[in-house]
Amino acid sequence: MTQVLIVEDEPDIRRFLRLTLAQDGWTVAEAGSVSLALAEAAERRPGLVILDLGLPDADGSEFIRAFRTWSDAPILVLSARSQEADKVDALEAGADDYLVKPFGVAELLARVHALSRRRLPRDMPEQALIRFGETEIDLARRQVSRAGSPVKLTPIEFNLLVYLASHPDRVLTQRQILRAVWGEGHAGDSHYLRIYIGRLRQKLEADRTRPRHLLTETGVGYRMVL
């Protein structure tokens, strides 16, 4: 069956989820933090993610936004946060379903089965590395290098680059990119996008005024050429 990635920092809950899913026939991978979860996701390419929000190094919504730049695999949030605002934030970030702790095993498995039937994940890169020109993107380590030298990117810059590079030679509208990288609430903030595209060109293009990889499609959006 599809591999499930469990992202949960409480060992007892993580163990319970692992055993429950394994008994139901799923292959399971685990992570206890956002950084480890992103590395595991890049290496293992899970077909479904079960995610806690209260993680030690960052909020789970940060994982959702980063993961959504290169995968459409369903995400089920399991959280003790029961407020409507928390649910809305997670769903708008890109989660597919939200289950409040404590929960019953039957309901958990029913939601997992429903998500696995709902859609197949978009193909992720075949490897955890994406290369274009002199640039290499390491998805597992969330690192970028150019001509062998490290390039320092902010989390937003990295997520934007990965989203574009995961859709090579495809014209992406400004609204599509903003929703994927910044979230639904920023779908109209095209000035954000211009600023960050400019930063990426400055760091990764040989000549930012004549880009070869991060191309503007006038009046529409952007296209990445690998």
Image (cartoon, rainbow, N blue to C red):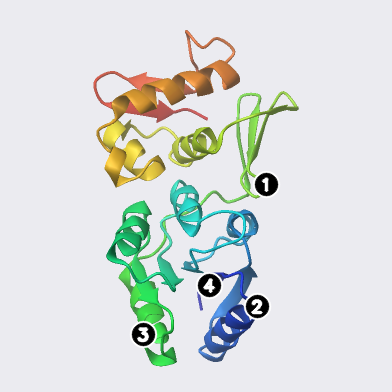
Provide residue 90's location: percent of width, then percent of height: 37, 59
CB-based contact (under 8 Å), mark 1 and mark 4: no
Q: Horizontal placement of 154 versus 196: left or right?
A: right
**Of marks 2 and 3, which one's residue comes earlier in the chain?**
2
Mark 1, residue position: 141
Q: Are marks 1 and 2 in contact (CB under 8 Å)?
A: no
Q: Nearer the viewer, residue 215 or 198?
A: 198
Distance of label 2 from label 3 (alpha carbons): 23 Å
The residue carrying mark 2 is 11
User: Nearer the viewer's eye, disc 2 or disc 3?
Assistant: 2
Q: Mark 4 or mark 1, which is nearer the start of the sequence?
A: 4
Residue drawn at x 49%, y 59% is: 60
Q: Is residue 22 above or below residue 150?
A: below
Residue 22 appears left or right of 77: right
Residue highlighted by disc 4: 4
Tag 4 secondary structure: strand
Residue occupying image coordinates x 52% and y 30%:
226
**Sequence-first tag of 1 and 2:** 2
Residue that mark 3 sits on: 110
Tell me which residue sits at (46%, 54%) in the image: 123
Image height of 51 relative to 122, above or below: below
Q: Position of residue 219 (x, y in %)?
A: 24, 21
Q: Residues within 10 Å of mark 2 (few under 14, many from 20)?
A: few
| Distance from Cα at disc 1 to Cα at disc 2 | 24 Å
